[in-house]
Image: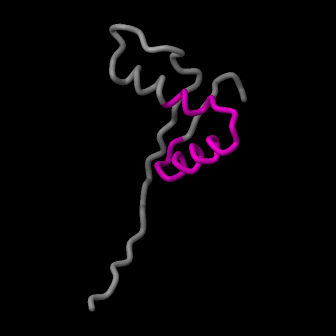
């Protein structure tokens, strides 16, 4: 039986999603604009279970939301 391999996740980059994002997709949007709107939508749910899941995923992938309204 072989030994297990130990590893450590080393992510040095943090992805910041600026809020607010686009409310709805529109024709002619770039892929970046569509992704921005999609990621910003993840921050909108008020259900605590959904928020917890989104927070866990964001922590896993080093994604942070930044609201320029001072919130």
The furthest residue to the left = 2
Decide whether residue 40 is among the magenta residues: yes
Q: Quadrant of the N terminus?
A: bottom left
Q: Is residue 61 above or below residue 4?
A: above
- Residue 27 on image: x %, y %: 35, 8
6 magenta-colored: no
Quadrant the C terminus occupies = top right
- Which corner quadrant of the image does residue 44 belong to? top right
The spot of residue 54 in percent (x, y) is 57, 43
Nearer to the camera, 38 or 65: 38
Question: Could you tell me residue 61's position as x and y percent?
Answer: 46, 49
Residue range of the region highlighted in magenta in the rendering: 39-63
Using the rendered view, name the quadrant where residue 42 is placed: top right
The residue sitting at 37% across, 24% down in the picture is 32
Q: Nearer the viewer, residue 51 or 59?
A: 51
Residue at 56% x, 40% y is 64
């Amino acid at each position: 039986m072989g030994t297990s391999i130990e590893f450590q996740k080393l992510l040095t980059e943090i992805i910041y999603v600026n809020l607010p994002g686009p409310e709805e997709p529109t024709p002619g949007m770039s892929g970046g604009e569509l992704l921005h709107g999609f990621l910003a939508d993840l921050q909108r749910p008020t259900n605590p279970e959904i928020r917890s899941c989104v927070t866990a995923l964001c922590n896993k992938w080093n994604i942070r939301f930044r609201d320029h309204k001072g919130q």
